[in-house]
Every structure is written in C-alpha cells, then in structure tokens.
Image (cartoon, rainbow, N blue to C red):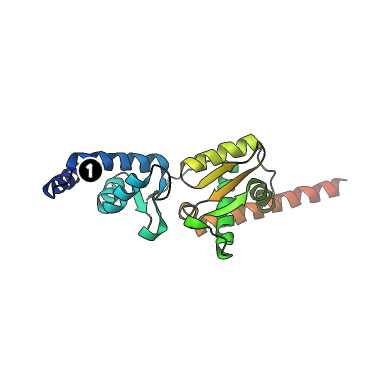
Amino acid sequence: MLRDLSKLIDDEDSENGDGELLEKELRQAAQQLWRAQFIYENDWGMKTAYEALRRHTGYFENLFDALGYRVVGRPNDGYIGLIAIDLPPRQSMKLDESLLLLVLRLHYEEAFTRFEAKEFGEIEVESEQILQIYEDRTHRERPNFGRVKEILSGFKQRGLVRIVDQDDKNFTLFLRPALPIVISKDTLGSLEEFVARSTAAATSVDTESEVEA
C-alpha cells in the first residue's frame, strides 16, 4: 500500500501537481470513509474526500481489500461506501436495532418502487410512520423513544439515514440509498421469517391459554 501511495504522489509531482497535498487528501479520505462507512458527494464537508475516492478508486479498492472490505458505489450513485467481504458469523447488533434496520430497508424499497425518491435518491418518512410500520411488520412493541433515537443516531453516523428534528417526540427521517447495499434482499427475508416465527409462537400461547381456561 505504501508503494502505491508513493507512486501516486510521485506521479502528481511529475505532472506539476502538489504531491504533499494529494497525500494528505488521500489519508483524510480513507479515514473519513473508514469512520462513516458511507459518504455522499452532496454532504457538507465531504466533497474533497469524495472526489479523492472517486479519482483514485483503484488505490482505495486495494487498500480496503487488504483490510477485508469492498468499495461500493458507482459514479452516478453519489455515494461511496464499504462492505465487509466476509461477514462475521455473529453480528453485534441487538434485536430491536436489527429489526428497525430491516424495516427501514423494507420501507425504502417499497417507497422507491412507488417513485417516492427525492433528490439524491433519499426517501422521506416521519418517525411515527416508520415506528407504526415497525409494529405492523414485526408484531412487536416499538422501542421507547430514547432507544429509537439512539439506534438512529448510529445509523446516521454510518450514512444510512439523515434526521431532521422537529420536536421532542417527532422527527423526519431521510432514508439514504446506501440502505439497499447494507441490507440485501436475502437478508430482508429474515424479517419475514422472524415475523412468521413470532406469530406462530404467539398463536400457540393463545391456544394453550384457551384450552387451560
């Protein structure tokens, strides 16, 4: 990787560019992508990093491949992100976090097919609407409001959502186009499987109660 970086710097200098500045931009772009997972061309403060990532895609692909990640995002997508090449056998996400992410992904896909995507491929939805969808789709009680904000804050840091606060109990979510990349259609099916199992278990408990009565 250091050899590749040195070549890019030397090439920049040989073309009457600023190799030292390029090195700084490449390092900062790698750090920003690593911290955020997804960065967008239109986000404040990300333009330089985005352009560096796009201009030197081959360098960053090799760099992150060595760390076990794949660089994703085409030029017309307006974003660049990282996806693990081999997913770990166990995910660290809690159940409510996983389910909310799946619900966001499901809503994004359904709204997108209804041509509801706004500028930059985002889907707008109110917090109450998405939490109602959570209850309807998972057949589980929604997490408390503080927990919801905590979960969504993590998703925001990863570039999966934008949040526009309105008051203490309502806010607007903008679901971002990286969601379908993070949650594939195969993974999306796990939500339906979970709901089916939960419903079957609940039905079994209700039936047993009726018999005992």
Q: Position of residue 66 (x, y in %)?
A: 28, 46
Is residue 101 left or right of 212 when viewed as pictured? Answer: left
Res 168 quadrant in image: top right
In the rendered view, does 113 fall on the left or right side of 178? right
The residue at 59%/38% (across/down) is 149
Give left or right: position of 50 versus 185: left
Tell me the residue that label 1 is attached to: 22
Q: Residue at x 56, y 56 (%)?
A: 108
Quarter the N terminus occupies:
top left
Q: In terms of depth relative to the viewer, which is nearer, 22 or 155? A: 22
Percent of width and height locating residue 110: 58, 61
State the SS at label 1. Answer: helix
Q: Is residue 192 visible?
A: yes
Residue 68 in view of the camera: no
- 23 or 143, which is in the foreground? 23
Residue at the image point whose x is 18% and y is 47% from the top: 8
Counting the numbered discs, the total is: 1
| Residue plotted at (66% across, 52% down) | 133
How dense is the environment of label 1, judged by Cα within 10 Å: few (below 14), some, or many (20 and up)? some
Question: Given the current orientation, which residue lies at the most extreme right position?
Answer: 213
Q: Position of residue 182 (x, y in %)?
A: 47, 51
Front residue of this view, candidates 99 and 206 = 99
**Three-letter amino acid code at disc 1?**
Leu
Taking the view exactly as shown, the residue that stands out farthest to the left is: 14
